[in-house]
C-alpha cells in the first residue's frame, strides 16, 4: 500500500520546509520515495545548506533537538556565519536520508563538537556567494560587503545582489574537505566571536508554538494509510522463557491480525490501538521462570554490590603516597555513599512506527541517534543500509540511551513480519520497568586532614552495577535482539567513573570496580546512559565527602573548596582550573553566601530547619557550581529545596535564554533523582512500574527561586576564538550533593543514601536524636 | 455504521468504535486530535488531559461511551478565531517547554485552575498542578507562565 503524497505531508508536517527547496532534496523529504536512501555526502556543501531564489536558506544538520533549543542554536551559528538574517533561515534535523550523519544527539556535544563543521560550512557558503558576486560586479571580493544575505560593492552600495539571486535556484556544487564529518571544512575561516551578531541573542524556539497549540506532529502521531498497532507482551519475571502461547483468547477479537513470537519476544498486532491493548492483555503466554534468581532485591542491592566479585576493576590512579599520608594524618574520616538504579522513565513510553512500503523501511522515531537506529536496524534485519531510513520527529524526553532505541527495532521487525506499517507503543509499566537504567553505585571515601585542617590525602573507591552497559542501537543488544536469542560473546565492560573536579590534594587514590547482577541478558535491570551517565552518582559521593571534610576541619565549605582549587596554577588547555574558581565564586556571590562552617546551628523556626549546601563539578569543559537552600521538616522528614543557584561556564553562549531553561530543568531532573527516584525490585521483577510506585518530582516540589549565572571564566574572556562547550549534562552532576550538604547544614545529619525521601530523612533525624 | 457521537471543540463527530474504548484513542486515532497524549493509561500523569464540564479529565481512563453529549475541549480547541489562549501565549512568552510532550496536560490543567480561580497564589498553583507530571521538569517556568497568564487575563 502506497500512501499518497498528501497523506504523507499531512502526517509528517514537513511541508513547511519544502517550499521552494532544491528539487532533489524536496523529493527526499516528501517520501515515501521508493528508495534507496544513500547517505547525504558531508563533503558536498549542498548537503548542508540550500539557498533559494527568495533569499531564504535552510540548514540540514545531522543532529536532533531534545527540547533544549539546540536546533535554534544551530540556526543561530549558521545564520551568523552565512550572514543571513535569522528569520530567513530554517533548520532540518536528524532524518537519515536528508541530513548528513552527525550521529544525532548525545554527550551534550551538539555545540562543542558538531557546531564547528556547521559554522565552517556556513562560512564556506558565504565565501562562495561573495566570490560569485565578485565575478558579477567585476571587483575583488575584498571590496564587497555582506549584510543580511545581500552582497554590495563597498564603494557603491547601489550595486547589490541577494544570495538568492546569485545562486538563481541552483546548487552550490562545491566540494568540501575533511576526513570525517566533524572535520568538514571549506576554505573559509569562521568569524571571530566579536563579529557574531546572532550568537548571544535569544531568538525564541520555533518548536514551541506548535507544541502549545497542538499542531506539531510528533513521532507518536505519525500515521500512514494501512498502519496497524502493536503491543509487546513482556516476560512477567526477568529471565522467563516462553513455554507456549495459546492464541485462542485473541484469535476472534475484533481487529486481530497476528501474534508475533520469536524466542522470548512476543507482540500482538491489531487494526486499532485499543484492540491491540486488549489482545496483549488477553493473550495467554505460558512463561517458564528461570532456575536462579535474576537479581537480589532492591533492599539487598548494596550489600550484594559490596560483596560481589567485580567483573572489572580499574588500575587505581595514585598520586603521592596516600597510605602513608593517611597514617600520618591528624584526622581521618571515611564514609560510604549509595545511589540506587534510576531510570529514564520518559513521560511518554517508548514508541515508533515503521513503514515497509516499496521493500524499504522508513522508521519514524524520536530516538536521539537516528543514524545509529538506521544502521542498527539494517544490520538486525540484514537489509542494505541504504534501504532503511529513519525520520526523526520530536518525542518525550530522550536523555541518553532510552527505550526509544528498542521500540524502533521492534517496529521495524514487526513491519517486516506483518508486511504493513506498524506502530508499536510501550505501556507505562513496560517503560518504567524495562527502560535502561543508570547504574547503581556504592562509593567508599576516605580522607585525612593535618593539624591545620588541610586535606592531605583523599581516597575514592567506587563499585558500579554496570556490567553489560548497553550502547546505542546495537543490533545485538537492543531488547528485541536479546529476547530473540542473540548473544554478544563478551558483554560490555561498563564503567565505574571517577570524580570530575580540579582539587589539588597531594596524596590521592582513585579506584573503580564494576559488578554484575546474576542475570546478564533479558533483564529489566539493564544499564545504559542516563543523562550524564555516572555524574550524579559519582558527584553525590565526592562532593558530599568534601563537605564532610570541610565540616571536620571546621571550615566554610566554599572556602575549603577554593583553597583546594587555588593550591596549584597548573591547568589544562580549557583553563578548567581558572574557570572552576570563577564559577565557585560566582555561585557564592549570587547566593549571598555567608562564610561559616556547617552545620548552621541556627534556631529552628517551628518544625522547619533551614540550611544551604554547595557542590561543584565539571563535565568535559563545562564547569558548574550549585547551591541548594533547603527546608527540612523535623516531624515528617520532608525536604523542600526552596532555592537553587547555578553558576555555569560553557564558554561562548549561543542562546542565553534557552541555556537558562536547560540549566533549570537539568537541575530539577537531578533534584528529582535526589528526592524521589529509585528503581525498586523483588528477586524476580521490577516493582516500581508507574508514577505511584516510582514517584517523581512534581509542581509541589518546585523551588520558589532558581538563579542561573552564566559565567565566562576564561582568563582571556574576549578572545576571538572563545569555544562553545557543551552545556546540558554538566548541571546534572552537583545537585544531589548540594542538597545532601544543605540537609546536613540544616540538621547536622548526613544522608548518604539516595533518594532523600521523607521516611529516610526522618529515620536519620530520629537516629541522631537518640 | 456510526454508533457514537462526540462533541469536541464545538464540532459533532460520529464515530464507529467500541464504546468502552478510552476517549484518548478516539480523539487521537479517529478524530486526528493529537494534542492529548498517551503518558500512562492510568490517570496518573495528566498528559492525556481534556476539559469536560469545566473539569480536567484524563482521557486515557474515561471511556468514549461515557462522554457522549458532553462538550469536550482539547488543546486544539483553546485558541479562538486564530488567537491563542492567554495561557498558550504565556507558554510561548516564558519559553516553557523542553521536549513538550506533557504540556497539553499542563496547559489544560492550568486553564481549569484559572477558570475557577483567576488569581491563584503560588500555593494554589502548586496544589492544583501537582498531579500533572513533567519529566523534563519545566515546573518552574510553567508556574511563571500561569502567573503571567493570570495577570494578562485580569
Image (spheres, grey):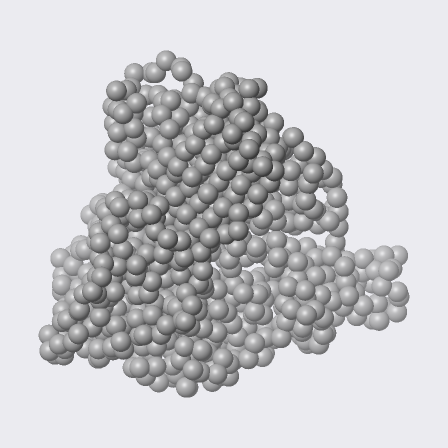
The percent position of residue A358, horizontal first and vertical second, equals: 41, 86
Depicted A208 relative to depicted A657: above or below: below
- Disc tally is 0
Q: What x and y, as percent, mark residue A249?
A: 10, 74
Place of residue A285 in the rendered image (x, y in percent of width and height, measured from the top left): 16, 71
> In which image quadrant can residue B24 be found?
bottom left
Specify whether A8 is left or right of A252: right
> Which residue is more in the foreground, A435 or A237?
A237
Q: Residue at x 55, y 36 (%)?
A: A322
Any part of residue B107 in sight = no
Image quarter (top left, top right, bottom left or bottom right) of the N terminus of chain A: bottom left
| Quadrant of the image containing the C terminus of chain A | top left
Q: Is residue A150 visible?
A: yes
Q: Residue at x 77, y 66 (%)?
A: A187
Asked if residue B56 lies left or right of residue A373, the reply is left
For residue A563, above or below residue B147: above
Place of residue A411 in the rendered image (x, y in percent of width and height, measured from the top left): 34, 73
Furthest-top residue in this view: A603
Q: Residue at x 20, y 65 (%)?
A: A291
Front residue of A551/A279: it is A551
Give residue A604's quadrant in the image. Answer: top left
**Who's the residue at 19% across and 77% down the image?**
A256
Viewer-side residue, B114 vs A647: A647
Relative to residue A68, is residue A604 drawn left or right? left
Amino acid at each position: 500500500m502506497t500512501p499518497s503524497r498528501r497523506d504523507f505531508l499531512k502526517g509528517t508536517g514537513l511541508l513547511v520546509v519544502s517550499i521552494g527547496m532544491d528539487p532533489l532534496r524536496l523529493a527526499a523529504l516528501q517520501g515515501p520515495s521508493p528508495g534507496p536512501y544513500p547517505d547525504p555526502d558531508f563533503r558536498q556543501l549542498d548537503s548542508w545548506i540550500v539557498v533559494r531564489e527568495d533569499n531564504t536558506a535552510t540548514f540540514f544538520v545531522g543532529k536532533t533537538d531534545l527540547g533544549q533549543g539546540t536546533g535554534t542554536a544551530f540556526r543561530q551559528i549558521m545564520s551568523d556565519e552565512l550572514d543571513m538574517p535569522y528569520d530567513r533561515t530554517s533548520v532540518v534535523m536528524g532524518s537519515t536520508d536528508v541530513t548528513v550523519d552527525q550521529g544525532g544527539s548525545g554527550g551534550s556535544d551538539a555545540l562543542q563538537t558538531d557546531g564547528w563543521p556547521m559554522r565552517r560550512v556556513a562560512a564556506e557558503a558565504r565565501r562562495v556567494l561573495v566570490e560569485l558576486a565578485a565575478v558579477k560586479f567585476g571587483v575583488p571580493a575584498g571590496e564587497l560587503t555582506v549584510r543580511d544575505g545581500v552582497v554590495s560593492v563597498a564603494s557603491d552600495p547601489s550595486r547589490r545582489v541577494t544570495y538568492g539571486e546569485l545562486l538563481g535556484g541552483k546548487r552550490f556544487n562545491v566540494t568540501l574537505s575533511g576526513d570525517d564529518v566533524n572535520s568538514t571544512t571549506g576554505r573559509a575561516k569562521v568569524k571571530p566571536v566579536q563579529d557574531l551578531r546572532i550568537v548571544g541573542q535569544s531568538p525564541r524556539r520555533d518548536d514551541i508554538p506548535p507544541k502549545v497549540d497542538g499542531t506539531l506532529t510528533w513521532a507518536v502521531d505519525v500515521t500512514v494509510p494501512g498502519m496497524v498497532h502493536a503491543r509487546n507482551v513482556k516476560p512477567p519475571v526477568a529471565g522467563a522463557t516462553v513455554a507456549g502461547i495459546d492464541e485462542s483468547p485473541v484469535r476472534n477479537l475484533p481487529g486481530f491480525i497476528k501474534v508475533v513470537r520469536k524466542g522470548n519476544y512476543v507482540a500482538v498486532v491489531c487494526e486499532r490501538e485499543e484492540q491491540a491493548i486488549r489482545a496483549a492483555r488477553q493473550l495467554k503466554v505460558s512463561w517458564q521462570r528461570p532456575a536462579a534468581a535474576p537479581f537480589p532485591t532492591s533492599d539487598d542491592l548494596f550489600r550484594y554490590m559490596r560483596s560481589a566479585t567485580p567483573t572489572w576493576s580499574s588500575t587505581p590512579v595514585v598520586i603521592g603516597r596516600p597510605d602513608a599520608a593517611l597514617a600520618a594524618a591528624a584526622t581521618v574520616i571515611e564514609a560510604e555513599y549509595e545511589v540506587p538504579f534510576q531510570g529514564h522513565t520518559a513521560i511518554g513510553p517508548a514508541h515508533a512506527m515503521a513503514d515497509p512500503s516499496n521493500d524499504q523501511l522508513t522508521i519514524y522515531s524520536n530516538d536521539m541517534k537516528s543514524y545509529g537506529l538506521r544502521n542498527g536496524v539494517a544490520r538486525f534485519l540484514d537489509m542494505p543500509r541504504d534501504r532503511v531510513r529513519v525520520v526523526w520527529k520530536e518525542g518525550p524526553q530522550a536523555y541518553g540511551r532510552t527505550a526509544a532505541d528498542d521500540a524502533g527495532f521492534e517496529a521495524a521487525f514487526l513491519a517486516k513480519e506483518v508486511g504493513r506499517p506498524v506502530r508499536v507503543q510501550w505501556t507505562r509499566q513496560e517503560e518504567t520497568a524495562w527502560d535502561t537504567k543508570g547504574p547503581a553505585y556504592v562509593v567508599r571515601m576516605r580522607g585525612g586532614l593535618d593539624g591545620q585542617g588541610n586535606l592531605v590525602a583523599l581516597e575514592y573507591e567506587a563499585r558500579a552495577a554496570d556490567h553489560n552497559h548497553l550502547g546505542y542501537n546495537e543490533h545485538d543488544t537492543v531488547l528485541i535482539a536479546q529476547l530473540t536469542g542473540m548473544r554478544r560473546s563478551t558483554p560490555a565492560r561498563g564503567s565505574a567513573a571517577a570524580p570530575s573536579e580540579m582539587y589539588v590534594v597531594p596524596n590521592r587514590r582513585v579506584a573503580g570496580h564494576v559488578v554484575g547482577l546474576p542475570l546478564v541478558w533479558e533483564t529489566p535491570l539493564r544499564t545504559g546512559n542516563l543523562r550524564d551517565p555516572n555524574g550524579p552518582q559519582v558527584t553525590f559521593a565526592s562532593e558530599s565527602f568534601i563537605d564532610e571534610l570541610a565540616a571536620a576541619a571546621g571550615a566554610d565549605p566554599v572556602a575549603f573548596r577554593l583553597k583546594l582549587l587555588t593550591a596549584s596554577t597548573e591547568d589544562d588547555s580549557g583553563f578548567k582550573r581558572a574557570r572552576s574558581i570563577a564559577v565557585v565564586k560566582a555561585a557564592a556571590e549570587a547566593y549571598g553566601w555567608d562564610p561559616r562552617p556547617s552545620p548552621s546551628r541556627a534556631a529552628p523556626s517551628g518544625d522547619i530547619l533551614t540550611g544551604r549546601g554547595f557542590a561543584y563539578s565539571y563535565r568535559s569543559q563545562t564547569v558548574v557550581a550549585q547551591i541548594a537552600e533547603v527546608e527540612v521538616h523535623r516531624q515528617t522528614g520532608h525536604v523542600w529545596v526552596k532555592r537553587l543557584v547555578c553558576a555555569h561556564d560553557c564558554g561562548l553562549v549561543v542562546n542565553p535564554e534557552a541555556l537558562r531553561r536547560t540549566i533549570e530543568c537539568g537541575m530539577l531532573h537531578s533534584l528529582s533523582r535526589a528526592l524521589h527516584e529509585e528503581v525498586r525490585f523483588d528477586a524476580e521483577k521490577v516493582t516500581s512500574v508507574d508514577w505511584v510506585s516510582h514517584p517523581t518530582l512534581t509542581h509541589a516540589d518546585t523551588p520558589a527561586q532558581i538563579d542561573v549565572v552564566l559565567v565566562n571564566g576564561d582568563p582571556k574572556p574576549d578572545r576571538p576564538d572563545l569555544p562553545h562547550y557543551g552545556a546540558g549534562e554538566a548541571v546534572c552532576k552537583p545537585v544531589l550533593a548540594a542538597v545532601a550538604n544543605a540537609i546536613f547544614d540544616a540538621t547536622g545529619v548526613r544522608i548518604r543514601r539516595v533518594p532523600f525521601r521523607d521516611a529516610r530523612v526522618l529515620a536519620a533525624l530520629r537516629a541522631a536524636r537518640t | 455504521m456510526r454508533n457514537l457521537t462526540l462533541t469536541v471543540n464545538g464540532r459533532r463527530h460520529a464515530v464507529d468504535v467500541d464504546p468502552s474504548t478510552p476517549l484518548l484513542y478516539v480523539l487521537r486515532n479517529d478524530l486526528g486530535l493529537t494534542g492529548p497524549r498517551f503518558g500512562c493509561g492510568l490517570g496518573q500523569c495528566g498528559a492525556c488531559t481534556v476539559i469536560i464540564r469545566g473539569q480536567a479529565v484524563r482521557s486515557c481512563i474515561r471511556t468514549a461511551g461515557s462522554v457522549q453529549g458532553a462538550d469536550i475541549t482539547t488543546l486544539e480547541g483553546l485558541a479562538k478565531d486564530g488567537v491563542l489562549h492567554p495561557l498558550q501565549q504565556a507558554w510561548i512568552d516564558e519559553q516553557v517547554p523542553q521536549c513538550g510532550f506533557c504540556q497539553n496536560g499542563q496547559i489544560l490543567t492550568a486553564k481549569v485552575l484559572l477558570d475557577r480561580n483567576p488569581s491563584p497564589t503560588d500555593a494554589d498553583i502548586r496544589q492544583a498542578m501537582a498531579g500533572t507530571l513533567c519529566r523534563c521538569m519545566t515546573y518552574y517556568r510553567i508556574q511563571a507562565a500561569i502567573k503571567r497568564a493570570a495577570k494578562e487575563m485580569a
